[in-house]
Amino acid sequence: MRKIYGIGETVLDIIFKNDTPQAAKPGGSVLNSLVSMGRIGMPVSFISDYSQDDVGELVERFLKNNGVNTRLVHRFKKGNTSLAMAFLDENNDAHYTFYKNKPAERIDIKLPEIKKGDIIQYGSFYAIWTEIRRRFRNFIRDAKDNGAIVLYDPNFRKTHIPELVKLKPLIIDNIEISTLIRGSDQDFRNIFGTGSADDTWNIISNHCKCMIYTANEEGVFVRTPSFSGKFPVKKITPLSTIGAGDSFNAGVITSLFEKRIRAEQLTELTETEWSEIISVAVDFATDVCCSYNNYVSESFANEFISARARTKK
């Protein structure tokens, strides 16, 4: 049976609007994706680390209650689970302040054997953080070589631009060891200074052969050597955009998994196939934007499960 693994940081997101706390939710970009998939019954496992403190216990219970396997999570004793203060602006986009107290030794776990057809998602600063990256770089490269789909989302924020000279080579290396890159227009503008999907593809195509470029209300752009297309998004007034891109990734992975698409098929998918994949991803992201949750709602998950059951009859 194919398996889905996510590698990423764990935080507790405390969300503010107009200087007032609105919600506190377990977060981290990959965690958000896995919870969205766990809620619809996908076989997801989380590779991460968080403390044995009270916040870590809260996160552990939450993940297990939402169908995420935590067997590969390192629970450290010294230090605390990270906190992220998310401040929503007038467009309900967030900027963050992080509070971290981590031990020097990280991710003391035995990594799983990745087989052909498995799917791995990783990204954000966790994927370029030196002390973490040295643990995972060869694992991810070997996963790609073994025939897994490796989805990389750089999720590169403005706050890290002063470090770009040092970090950019690591980002490019991550792109090269992945089979699918999904990033926002803002991510790629921050990293490469590009302003369009085509300009970005001119760079990405030298390192990876499949790119999904999201540009808010402008739509979703897909580029491979055999396909170039644009797909619409739904017009909504978001309550919060936290987790929207993460659940978009969850929708992409869900479609690839359920359609039994393999890594070698990504560059040969047709417009119809991409349209179906992106449509599911947009549905996931749209639902997340309608609440302060970082993941698809339980009602959305139940409707998705019911629709899937009807389709299989």
Image: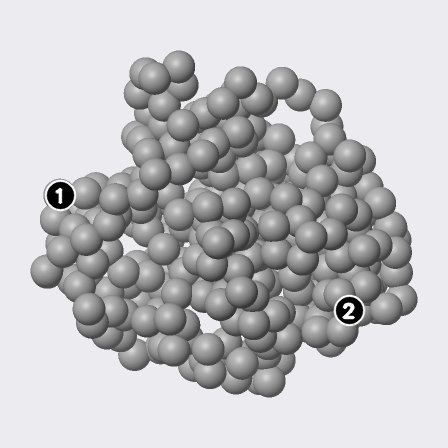
Position of 73 compared to 249: left or right?
left
Position of 253 compared to 37: left or right?
right
Q: Residue at x 10, y 60 (%)?
A: 78
Q: Nearer the viewer, residue 289 or 271?
A: 289
Q: Nearer the viewer, residue 48 or 79?
A: 79
Residue 72 position, x and y percent, is 31, 67
Which of labels 1 and 2 is toward the front?
A: 2
> Residue 199's quadrant in the figure?
bottom right
Residue 164 tag number? none
Please tell me which of labels 1 and 2 falls first in the chain: 1
Residue 84 versus residue 74 in the image, above or below = above
Residue 92 versus residue 45 in the image, above or below = above
Q: Residue at x 50, y 76 (%)?
A: 140
Q: Residue at x 67, y 21 (%)?
A: 236
Residue type, numbered disc 1: Asp
Q: Which residue is mark 1?
A: 54
Label 1 sits on a secondary structure element that is helix
> Residue 209's quadrant in the figure?
bottom right
Position of 181 compared to 200: left or right?
left
- Answer whether residue 312 is visible to the viewer in this image: no
Residue 159 position, x and y percent, is 46, 46
Q: Which residue is mark 2?
A: 205
Residue type, numbered disc 2: Ser
Residue 141 versus residue 187 in the image, above or below = below
Q: Nearer the viewer, residue 19 or 78?
A: 19
Label 2: how many Cα within 10 Å (few below 14, some 14–19, many 20+): some
